[in-house]
Amino acid sequence: MDVAIPRDLDPQVRAETLAREKAYSQDLQRGGEWAHIWRIAGQYSNISIFDVTDNERLHEILWNLPLFPFMTMEITPLAQHPSDIAVET
Amino acid sequence: MDVAIPRDLDPQVRAETLAREKAYSQDLQRGGEWAHIWRIAGQYSNISIFDVTDNERLHEILWNLPLFPFMTMEITPLAQHPSDIAVET
Amino acid sequence: MDVAIPRDLDPQVRAETLAREKAYSQDLQRGGEWAHIWRIAGQYSNISIFDVTDNERLHEILWNLPLFPFMTMEITPLAQHPSDIAVET
Amino acid sequence: MDVAIPRDLDPQVRAETLAREKAYSQDLQRGGEWAHIWRIAGQYSNISIFDVTDNERLHEILWNLPLFPFMTMEITPLAQHPSDIAVET
Amino acid sequence: MDVAIPRDLDPQVRAETLAREKAYSQDLQRGGEWAHIWRIAGQYSNISIFDVTDNERLHEILWNLPLFPFMTMEITPLAQHPSDIAVET
Amino acid sequence: MDVAIPRDLDPQVRAETLAREKAYSQDLQRGGEWAHIWRIAGQYSNISIFDVTDNERLHEILWNLPLFPFMTMEITPLAQHPSDIAVET
Amino acid sequence: MDVAIPRDLDPQVRAETLAREKAYSQDLQRGGEWAHIWRIAGQYSNISIFDVTDNERLHEILWNLPLFPFMTMEITPLAQHPSDIAVET
Amino acid sequence: MDVAIPRDLDPQVRAETLAREKAYSQDLQRGGEWAHIWRIAGQYSNISIFDVTDNERLHEILWNLPLFPFMTMEITPLAQHPSDIAVET
Amino acid sequence: MDVAIPRDLDPQVRAETLAREKAYSQDLQRGGEWAHIWRIAGQYSNISIFDVTDNERLHEILWNLPLFPFMTMEITPLAQHPSDIAVET
Amino acid sequence: MDVAIPRDLDPQVRAETLAREKAYSQDLQRGGEWAHIWRIAGQYSNISIFDVTDNERLHEILWNLPLFPFMTMEITPLAQHPSDIAVET
């Protein structure tokens, strides 16, 4: 997810949107659906892992991101890796 | 990491290399440096997260992958995200 | 899914693999998981729609395609479109 | 079809255009020419399948989309796939 | 359409395939379905215009090109242009 | 040739420019230098074939297109194809 | 790092930002963390080498560049090369 | 070198900048450092060959182009070709 | 023009082909049609300027290059630049 | 510089070529023309900085790399950066 907030966005709208984005993300992290989030060093971008029941739910989460209108994102469907030690046993 | 094993590789060499790759990955997972591994659905590829002290160690780990000669990979340096709930407090 | 069968593949292996691919695809079509398949005009490629429970099942289906070793594919996660008339009511 | 509505579009024009787009799409779906439409998860984009008599008709449909000025699209000509179970006798 | 004939193809097979390709193309040109063909200067490639009833016929023509296994091609669906003087009146 | 007219262009300037573009194109079509023009289905783009004496003339024609400031184009130098039936005899 | 300062930025803000950028860069150069900086000939871009303890520090440095909002950058993790004469002995 | 002058640039500033660009280029051509310049047919772009003592001088020349802020360019370092007849003897 | 000679080409065939390529290029340079040739530093590639009557002649020259089967090339149609001092007067 | 040594290269030729490459690089490093070399983490690639008198010398150095036939490389002409502390005073 890359973020590009237009330079002419009202500073108050900007601050409020960023605050809502953070709260939104942390609620989903606490609920377990937003499994991981990392900052890409030197970029206004993140890499996130979602653990959701289906594509409908994934779309719902992403579409309602407060920063969605300013984001471009790329989605890669993941599955369990046979070498993952969590799979063993 | 995308894997492309040549079709003319000896089947026994192939099987042995895959077994060594799995053991190598799982040792590093148990040691905590290979933090996550996921299969990309429908691809002979994975997305992995490493937690290492520096680039020297990262290079050492990747260069010694038994499948390294058959892999192409792309590396993105990650940092902690300010919205990560693990950062809070 | 693009298919590129090497020119030096044994003709009998080739014929047999193609027959297995067709049977495999048609079984999944009858079962409803392989919802649609179209040929891209002028290409040895197809566009397919899968209706599966999760990414694990999707990966299992694709990984076991008889032609998998000769394919390159790109996967786009889809959801229901709000304008789809099947959604109405 | 990717949609990018400019941020400075009048909200009423925007709402009205979206309503016309939905009605336009659903009329063509009921008529059978717009055979399928899916949302790409996490994108303001869709993948659609059209079943039309020729390129002239396809162009007419797309050119008159209410959102056409804000869309970029890519068109792939499709044909029946020999493995499609609908083809079997 | 780009052509890349493998260097190790038997010279006689090569010559025969090229002859069949030329005859095949010229038959379709005479029949009116292969409306135009130009060589791209400095490339083993051509740009062709087809005038066919539907995508099924287009696919049939291309799939049966004697050089098809050695070609990569890109297809752009065309329609009449409103400024074309042939449309006037 | 792809056309992207800015949304804030004065509607009258826009209408007038489009009319001049059409007249300009049709004059050159009648003169034989603009040999073919097709609409790319679903795009505000065309594919055109020019038959001119040299690159100087080609540049002069394109540079003076009324829509030139709003166009991006790609030019491929073409030559006669040895399989073109017009070449035979 | 490519720099693209918007044409409508206030000239005084622009001058001040450039001065702060230079001071910021030179402080880090003197501190040893910004090891090298070169101008790419003919571009408003530079190639820089950083020598930092970890990705957190790298991100902190880049995120606080006064020109950060006007930059796009690409980061390549580097390690010591076995042929580097500094490694010998 | 591709040129993209913004549509809202003051016409007088535009005309003056173009005149300065031409004079600047011709001075360097007469001095021998700007060895060749060609227009790319149908583009607001040129291909130029520079014959300068080093990259510092090349950068100085390009950075001071009156149209530099509106240009994107790509630089390829060239050397004498062993088949160049000027090298013979 | 990029050159990629296969590693398994017979050394004598290779040497002979390179000699024929050089003679062919120099003949055309002496005749004035191959106006310039430069080596791209660090690449087995060249940038050449041709001055020919039309695309047919250009294609004939390129198609008959002894190294043509091992080359990939990109052709850009050039015209005189209005700032070229050779145009003045 | 990316290195891709073919799998079927004779192991002794391979070992010898690697040894010559290392010696060649270190000689130039000691001579000051090969100013820096870094390994790209996780890749069989390096990023190098050369400090040479002109493009002819750069080409000579690169063309004679023992691994040159197995390398693909990209060259960026660099100049001194005005913020480089080495420039100050």
Image: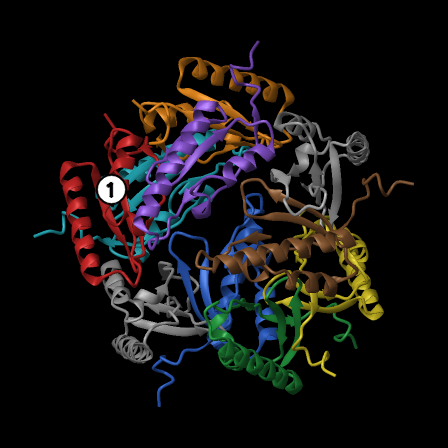
Chain colours: A red, B cyan, C orange, D purple, F brown, H green, I yellow, J blue
Classify residue C4 as left or right of residue D15: right
Q: Quadrant of residue D37?
A: top left
Image location (x, y in percent) of residue H73: 53, 68
| Residue for point 58% across, 70% down | H77
Q: How many numbered tags mark residues here?
A: 1
Q: Residues within 10 Å of mark 1 (few under 14, many from 20)?
A: few
Residue B64 or residue B51, whichever sits in front? B51
Classify residue B60 as left or right of residue H7: left
Residue wearing tag 1 = A64
| Residue for point 36% across, 40% down | D18
D75 vs B53: above or below: above
Classify residue J52 as left or right of residue I34: left
Q: Chain of mark 1?
A: A
Residue B32 or residue A19, whichever sits in front? A19
D47 vs F48: above or below: above
Mark 1 residue type: Asn
H1 vs H53: above or below: above
- Quadrant including the C terminus of chain J: bottom left
Q: Quadrant of residue A42?
A: bottom left
Image location (x, y in percent) of residue A83: 31, 33
Residue H15 or residue C16, whichever sits in front? H15
A89 vs J77: above or below: above
Please, which residue is most extreme toward the top here? D89
Q: Quadrant of residue J7?
A: top right
Q: Which element type, helix, strand or loop, lies under badge 1?
A: loop
Image location (x, y in percent) of residue H28: 61, 84
